[in-house]
Image (cartoon, rainbow, N blue to C red):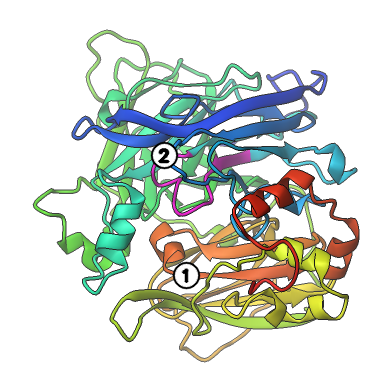
Amino acid sequence: MKFHLAVSTVFAACALAADVGKHWKIGWVDNVNPDGKFPRRAIGINGEFPNCPLSVNSDDFVHINVSNVFGDGRPTTLHGHGLYYKNVNYFDGAANIAQCPIPDGQSFRYELLNSPRAGKTERQWGTYWLHGHYKGQYVDGLRTPFIIHNADGEVYDYDDDYTVVLNDWYHEQHGYLIHHKYLTQDAIYPTPKEGLMYFAHTKVNQTSKNLPGYNENATLPFEPGKTYRLRLINMSAASRFDFWIEGHDMEIIEADGTDVKPFPTDVVQVGIGQRYSVLVKARNCSDHDWRIHADMEKSVYGRGFQHQDGDHLKLNLTSKVSYGKKNAKLGKGRKTIKTFKLFDDFSLEPVQKKSAESKPDMAVTLIVGMKESDDAIPMGVVNGTTFKAPLTPPILTMKSENDTTIMDPKVYGPNSNAVVAPYNHTVELKLVSGGGEHPIHLHGTKFQLVEKMQNASLPHTKESVRENPMRRDTVIIPNGGSVTIRFRADNPGAWIMHCHMDWHLSAGLAMLLIQAPKEAKEMLKVPSYLTQQCQMQGLPVHGNAGG
């Protein structure tokens, strides 16, 4: 199956740019029960769960006024996963890094796309998601797709656009699991009670909506002969998914907002935080429905898989493609992935060519993993140090310290693992697994994939970098292996890089990348309400990030 580049898109590309403003009230929603097994309290937006997807054009000005309506003293933030926030680092939403969290009863205006404050910057389009970035709130439900359509026309032709949301689900709240299960001497890794798959219709206009149902109660409507773009997003806390559709071929056309040349595949492996788009050609005629599969990889749960409190976690989720026939039976296709060939994201090639960054100005090796404290409590570590959020947000440290001090990693906190990169320097990071698989996400930057080793202990034989290497913002470090990434430090600000297994992040598996601090000090115009909200919580707004 081959798809051709589009001269024009079925979604009219000539639409005028819009001012897309939203008001989101973030707070608790009671009696949420997506798996039908256990009603619980979850975090929703404007009293709804699941949260509605947001679908816009790449030239729209998108801003959201977030009001914290928890009512129990709980702060919050909102992060746009994969967004550059070029020249507006303070809208990134990483709590205690780019801002102090929003106090209960207060509001914060996020300018997500094409902020007038940013000036003229590179356009973004593709598949993204919005989620909480304060103490695991996205695990409790604060997460939703954010789809950006290319206003100049999509690269490929297709007839309709759906998003496939993959995530895991817990019956207990994140705070309970962290403090009573995981970060204890028992160190029970929080294994989900259920995996969830649901669909959203995400056409270019702002009427995008979630389709009803989860898993076997969810259906994707296909019409014979049409071509569909399916956007896969893994919003999990702990789970990697393998996705495929029986009786249908797939071609990958996008990864993490990067359009790629068509790449046929039987199955798409989606790590936490990663996104892929696939084109699927509907059958010319079908009297059957067809299973959609999303399998959870249990190896990432470690010891937690043996502590299910008597519950059995169903690892193999299924939904279906329906052609609208009444009483249709399921078509017969391969029901396991044992015979499927897995793809390597290093094999993907961007449509928009960008040569590999030149020989790095700075190269840093980072060994990431988990260890136990002296009290046998799990700790995430980067080069032996467990991340602890600074008292003063580093963005404010850059604004208040002198030009010499802000180039010193120590000023950003003794437990920040900070790497400071001068403006426009080429940075190479070799990420080495100190044990376990880790999906690593870097805020504010799309990096090039330079090298992957499945076994980091083997003798190193450096291969030549591809002429047009894959670019993305979230990459999986294989268990016992390494991944080398490269990027240019051209986005001034303080950016967190962390494992997107939320339990590992909560245990401190993170570090700071300080890009171009001198330029950040000069050009970042921090909103007054950001510093005011720090002061409301008694948090310092000047000085070093150690507080």
Q: In the image, is residue 395 above or below residue 382?
A: above
Residue 392 vs residue 373: left or right? right
Q: What residue do we see at 12% from left, 54% from top? A: 309
Indicate left or right for 485 with 51 as reference.
Answer: right
- Residue picked out by circle 1: 508
Point out the stretch of residues depicted in magenta: 127-142
Q: Which residue is mark 2?
A: 141
Looking at the rendered structure, the secondary structure element under dot 1 is: loop
Residue lying at 69% horizontally and 76% vertically, measured from the top left = 419
Q: Position of residue 73 (x, y in %)?
A: 47, 44
Residue 267 lies left or right of residue 205; in this view the side is left
Q: Is residue 131 magenta?
A: yes
Q: Is residue 539 left or right of residue 195?
A: right
Q: Which labelled disc corresponds to residue 465?
A: none
- For the residues labelled 2 and 1, the Cα–Cα distance comes to 21 Å
Relative depth, front residue between 90 and 345? 90
Q: How many marks?
A: 2
Camera sees residue 469: no
Q: Is residue 184 magenta?
A: no
Query: Callout 1, which amino acid?
Result: Gly
Q: Residue furthest left?
A: 310
Camera sees residue 171: yes
Q: Is residue 78 above or below residue 322?
A: below
Asked whether 144 or 436 is in front, the reply is 144
Mark 2 Cα within 10 Å, few/some/many (few <14, many 20+)?
many
Relative image position of residue 320 (x, y in whole percent): 32, 27
- Where is residue 199 shown, x and y percent of the image? 43, 28
* Amino acid type, label 2: Gly
* Disc 1: CA contacts within 10 A as few (<14), some (14-19) or many (>=20): many
Q: Secondary structure at mark 2?
A: loop
Occupied quadrant, residue 48: top left
